[in-house]
Amino acid sequence: MSDFSLGQEDSWPLRFRLQRPMRDAVSKSERTVVEEVQKRWAPKDTAVIVCDVWDAHHCLNAVRRLEEFAPRMNEVLKEARKHGATIIHSPSDCMVAYEDHAARKRAVSAPAAKIKPKDVEHWCSRIPSEEQAVYPIDQSDGGEDDDPAEHAEWAAKLKAMGRNPGMPWQSQSKLIEIDADRDFISDRGDEVWNVLESRGIKNVILVGVHLNMCVLGRPFGLRQMVRNGKNVALMRDMTDCMYNPKRWPQVDHFTGNDLVIAHVERFVCSTITSDQLLGGEPFRSKYDQRENPQSVTATRKPQGNWSPISIPSPWSSTAAGITEHRGVAWYRCVVRLPKKVVHSGVLRLMYHDCEDTKGWLNGKPISIEGILPDDAVIMDDYNLLVLRVKHRNRPFTTGITQPPSIVSPSEKLELKGRWQFRIGDDNSWSNIPLPAKFGGSTDMLFEPH
């Protein structure tokens, strides 16, 4: 229970943690400072959105971590509901299970908002405040951190249950209660927006999983809420990430989680903790074996693996610290292809100074003429573009010197800006094991304006 009295018309005294850059006037160096700001939010003006707290997941460790903190999350929802906050359950891809549920019908019947924000129905991979940020982890492998033998056993168990081992979720976890008389159920951005606007919601708290993918990017996630003018907070002890410690920056899972929380606090929104509603201490996982975890502030520069690179730019400007390179380099980016671009005619990748170049879109080869494969294009969504370039017949102090473009008879998208690159040669780098909107990052994204 909360350690303070709160009436229906009163407000929660919340401590919002954020991070901001501070430049030292003497050394001219920049560091990040952590701050807490006290504010009061009225429950009647506040919604809690429960993101993708599914009944199953393809990663067994993710299931274990979620099931550990889900009971406390349920207590958070009960406390918020008791004081008049709006609770919206958003288990994506599971609406069939709730077709006849009163909370689902309530969301569908919410009055249409007078103003519908642009692209509120779509995934959001970046907002303007993130444009110059270096994304803190590599999640392009999907983030699974299971023991291989356990993972195989778990996949076999899911299959025996009649579930798709890759997408086994069918409903929200039974550990989270849904109040049929008061709550809402929706995984659609426009429906969630209608609920918020019809109830006069100014403040939004996100709980659930997984922070680096769904909690940030869903149509009802942190970025969309921030972009569309809501006061937004992540409950940082009621979330988790998909991060594999074998990937950059090679830290333990919970430090990887904290790195993403730090990214959110600096570039997206503030965070709070569950004890501010329930009392006691913030939740900490029994699987977190760190002796004295602190809030993470350091921006870690990628070394090896995939590193950010601006096209055009010299090798020396990259975090990898390369002064020159002769031979093969791989480049990748994520491109959002809206309907007007896809429907404007044949799409072609144009590049000028790339020698011996091969390309792939979402893992499928691009023709030697540069024509994008029709069956690979995901319209109104994010697409992974990968290039294998052999640099040999010019100075070796730089990579690609003229940005590639995606062109059609009436549209052109110049891919000038930040990509990721990698020295070496491995054909497995031509794709990632999950859709680009999940595995991509903010520092290799291109969107038409």
Image (cartoon, rainbow, N blue to C red):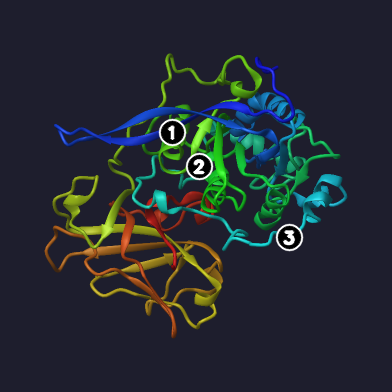
Q: Which image quarter holds the C terminus?
A: bottom left
Front-most of 221 and 334? Answer: 221
Kind of residue at disc 2: Asn
Helix, strand or loop status at disc 1: strand
Measured as percent of width and height from the top left, residue 354 is found at: 25, 70
Give residue 242's mark. Answer: none
Helix, strand or loop status at disc 2: helix
41 over 305 or under it: above or below: above
423 over 181 or under it: above or below: below
Front-most of 428 and 290? Answer: 290
From the image, tell me which residue sits under label 2.
Answer: 212
Q: On the picture, is 424 further left or further right than 410?
A: left
Q: Which image quarter holds the N terminus?
A: top right
From the image, tell me which residue sits under label 1.
Answer: 18
Q: Nearer the viewer, mark 3 or mark 2?
A: 3
Residue found at x 42% / y 75%: 367
Measured as percent of width and height from the top left, residue 437 is found at: 52, 54
Label 2 neighbour load within 10 Å: few <14, some 14-19, many 20+: many
Front-most of 224 and 408? Answer: 224
Q: On the picture, is 65 further left or further right than 355?
A: right
From the image, tell me which residue sits under label 3.
Answer: 112
Rounded to the nearest angstrom, the CA distance separating label 3 from label 2 is: 30 Å
Q: On the picture, is 362 further left or further right than 81?
A: left
Kind of residue at disc 3: Ala
Kind of residue at disc 1: Leu
First-in-chain label (2 vs 1): 1
Measured as percent of width and height from the top left, residue 18 is found at: 43, 33
